[in-house]
Amino acid sequence: RECPIQVAEASEKRAVSSALPDADLSELKQLRISSADAWLQLRVTGVQRVPAPASQHGSVMVLYTNVGQAVLDGTFLHVDQPMSTVLARSGIVLPPDVRAETGGENGGLENGGLELLGLFNTGPAAT
């Protein structure tokens, strides 16, 4: 007797920072930016590591989304004007060219900051 097998993407949700290895970041498919009162979930269309000697880890990550670009330097988040506008509509005020710490010692929701989570592909899983 044959039983149909369904193959679905398996995903994992976890914190995002520029310290993650390239192999992990290349599997990032969604980005969720949350404050204490609001959140926004975005589709990630591309990821780019850019050397930046003055950054926390020697490079920053540029995340291209369906609404704009975000730059991660460690746990600090920088967004462009289009993404800043969309975040503001969601109730998250993050002006362009302002760095916000997301997690770590001084950031995170418990300190009135932001939480940055990613949804990562973990490979196909048979069900």
Image (cartoon, rainbow, N blue to C red):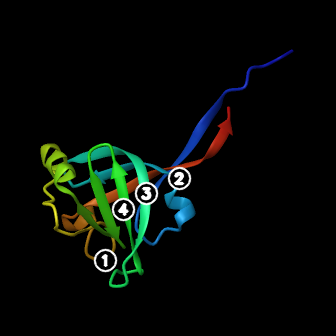
Kindly indicate whether the residue at mark 1 contacts the one at mark 4 (C-beta within 8 angstroms). no
Question: Disc 4 vs disc 2: which is toward the camera?
Answer: 4
Mark 1 Cα-neighbour bin, 10 Å: few <14, some 14–19, many ≥20:
few
Q: Residue furthest right?
A: 1
Image height check: is 46 above or below 76? above
Name the amino acid type tagged 1: Glu
Residue for point 40% across, 67% down: 17
The answer for how far apart the CA atoms under marks 2 and 3 are is 9 Å
Image coords of residue 86 (percent x, y): 18, 45
Say whether residue 86 is left or right of residue 117: left
Question: Disc 4 vs disc 1: which is toward the camera?
Answer: 4
Q: Secondary structure at mark 2?
A: loop
Comes first in the chain, label 3 or label 1: 3
Residue for point 21% across, 57% down: 80
Say whether residue 55 is left or right of residue 85: right
Q: Which residue is mark 2?
A: 27
Name the amino acid type tagged 3: Val
Q: Which residue is mark 1?
A: 105
Comes first in the chain, label 3 or label 4: 3
Image coords of residue 90 (percent x, y): 17, 44
Image coords of residue 50 (percent x, y): 40, 70
